Image (cartoon, rainbow, N blue to C red):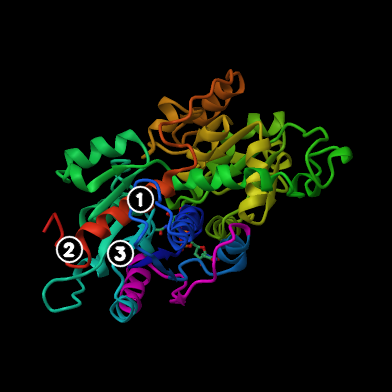
Amino acid sequence: MKIMTIVGARPNFMKAAPIIAAINEHNRKASKGRTVEGSDASIELQHVLVHTGQHYDEIMSGSFFSDLALPKPDVHLGIGSGSHAAQTAEIMKKYEEIVMAERPDVVIVVGDVNSTVACALVTSKVSFGGAGTRPLIAHVEAGLRSFDRTMPEEINRVVTDHVSDLLFVTEESGLANLNKEGISEENVHFVGNTMIDSLLAFQGKADSSTKLDELGLRSSSGRNGTGGKVSRYALLTLHRPANVDNRESLENILAGLRDLAKDCPIIFPVHPRTQKRIKEFGIDLDSHVANQNGSELPQSIASGILLIDPLGYLDFLCLMKNAWMVVTDSGGIQEETTCLGIPCVTVRENTERPVTVEKGTNIIAGTSREGIRAAIQTQSSRKAGLTTPTHWDGRAATRIVEVLVRVLANQRSSFRPALA
Ligand code: UD1
């Protein structure tokens, strides 16, 4: 049985890594003739890793392969950047050739990026035998909804879910959303969160990152390892087009961080999209900034924010777990901070991950400077009290592989899509 996993952009790598590890574990046990918990050990799984190349440079892609011990991709489509249409279309054209040549039994897509929807759509329409036979499509992180169709990721989520045969859900809201959209319950599996599998597997290793020392955030006694006193700092990430592609929005957010920047240093690993915009808008965070529409970024913000290049997985995890507070517009970081018990301020109007607010450490601040300030204020006095969402226990990928093996054993390759 052949399983093909698609990765393309930064947030895919940590979601796919545990699945590949769980496939290897299944095969290891199968080769020893051992029964694998709940699955048919006689099925050996062949795995093919496809990287679309949506993210392509060392800091957005390469370093994640080494940090997460991911195997080298078997196929690299080398797509690169482009408009949504151009990027999606290029992936679709090149991926169709690969899926036809490889003829996998299952294609796993993860998350909500353009690579996810492009490969799911291609797979939903290929036919191997002229009789409508095609691979099963498994969507990992199905059912999340922000209900904001201006977000490209929301379109990607909805379309991917509706062409998928197996929907692996990370939190209870996903079950309710898919149910409302008429997706058959038997195709939906609440397995937990593979991004959290990675976090739990790698957080020990992240302790050996030297980033805190390089940034002067830890006293020297802790150099090259744990120990030493870590200074209070906040960690910031911003990359949503709605937040960074417009000068006023970006400056508003930075203005909302003024009080926090007075209080403690804000470490800001800057995504390439945001780097470009900061340059283009002439926002100089090292000095006082006044802009054309009259608003201004006071010196106090500037002096408190330290811009650095995007970080690899382990370095970022180290900075996240030691942070006093995280301010972000990322989806995954809302989940990771919940798991780590670090207060998180989400600079968005909504979240597709409500469990991080209901059970976790997240506050949805909106994007106005007042909203951001107020949320930071609230989080400053937050008392730790950690509830881990259901199934965020490091075993999501194992559950996924168990389901896949069961389904493959029952249906083999003559599957007909349940939604057709
Ligand atoms: C994509 C995803 C988003 C995810 C984010 C994580 C979609 C629709 N968006 O957005 O959901 O949260 O990745 O980063 O799929 N660039 C580089 N080096 C790279 C990759 C990109 O410099 O390795 C530059 C590109 O030239 C482009 C910008 O970064 O100008 C944005 O990249 P793009 O792939 O368009 O989307 P993201 O904003 O990263």
Expressed as whole percent of the image width and height from the top left, the position of residue 283 reads 62, 52
Whether 61 is drawn above or below 195: the answer is below
Location of mark 1 (residue): 402
Residue type highlighted by circle 1: Glu
The residue sitting at 34% across, 62% down in the picture is 43
Q: Decide which of 382, 347 is in the foreground and name it.
A: 382
- Mark 2 or mark 3: whose residue is earlier in sequence: 3
Q: Decide which of 119, 398 is in the foreground and name it.
A: 398
Expressed as whole percent of the image width and height from the top left, the position of residue 139 reads 32, 54
SS for dot 1: helix
Residue type highlighted by circle 2: Phe
Whether 319 is drawn above or below 104: the answer is above
Cα separation between marks 2 and 3: 10 Å
Expressed as whole percent of the image width and height from the top left, the position of residue 103 reads 29, 75
Cα separation between marks 1 and 3: 13 Å
Q: Which residues are magenta?
A: 67-95
The residue sitting at 19% across, 39% down in the picture is 179
Cα separation between marks 1 and 2: 18 Å
The residue sitting at 66% across, 31% down in the picture is 324
Quarter of the image containing the N terminus? bottom left
- Mark 1 or mark 3: whose residue is earlier in sequence: 3
**Residue extending furthest toward the front:** 33
Q: Residue 115 sits in which quadrant? A: bottom left
- Mark 1 or mark 2: whose residue is earlier in sequence: 1
Residue type highlighted by circle 3: Val
Location of mark 3 (residue): 106
